[in-house]
Image (cartoon, rainbow, N blue to C red):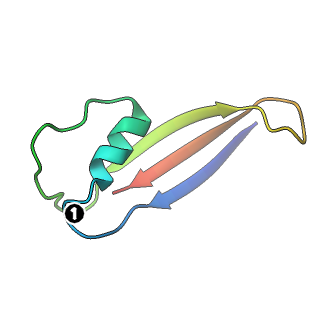
Amino acid sequence: PTITYKLFVSGKSGVGKTALVATLAGTPVPPVHHETLGIEATTVYWPAKPRASGRPVIFQLHFWD
């Protein structure tokens, strides 16, 4: 089964929100800071095996940065 979440990342400029999302997505972190204009959407698929159920699930995370 796939469980979907939309995660809105907000905060002050220059604190590392885009770098965090890039790291979680496995993409290169931008080497130079530039302000994100508008919203950048990134989708990450994260497999996990919760202890309670014991069967694997896939988390589909939509990061809005």
| The N terminus - image quarter | top right
Q: Nearer the viewer, residue 15 or 47?
A: 15
Q: Residue at x 80, y 38 (%)?
A: 50
Q: Is residue 64 shown above or below 44?
A: below
Number of numbered discs: 1
Residue 26 in percent (x, y) is at 39, 29
Q: Residue at x 90, y 38 (%)?
A: 53
| The C terminus - image quarter | bottom left
Q: Is residue 19 shown above or below 54?
A: below
Q: Is residue 34 shown above or below 52?
A: below
Q: In this image, 40 relative to 25: left or right?
A: left
Q: Nearer the viewer, residue 51 or 65?
A: 51
Q: Amino acid at mark 1?
A: Gly
Q: Residue furthest right?
A: 53
Q: Residue at x 43, y 38 (%)?
A: 24
Q: Is residue 29 shown above or below 61?
A: above
Report which residue position mark 1 lands on.
Answer: 38
Q: In this image, 59 relative to 29: left or right?
A: right
Q: Residue at x 28, y 53 (%)?
A: 16
Residue 60 in percent (x, y) is at 58, 42
Q: Nearer the viewer, residue 26 or 57?
A: 26
Look at the numbered disc 1 and give the secondary structure of its residue.
Answer: loop
Where is residue 10, by image quadrant? bottom left
Q: In this image, 47 relative to 31: left or right?
A: right
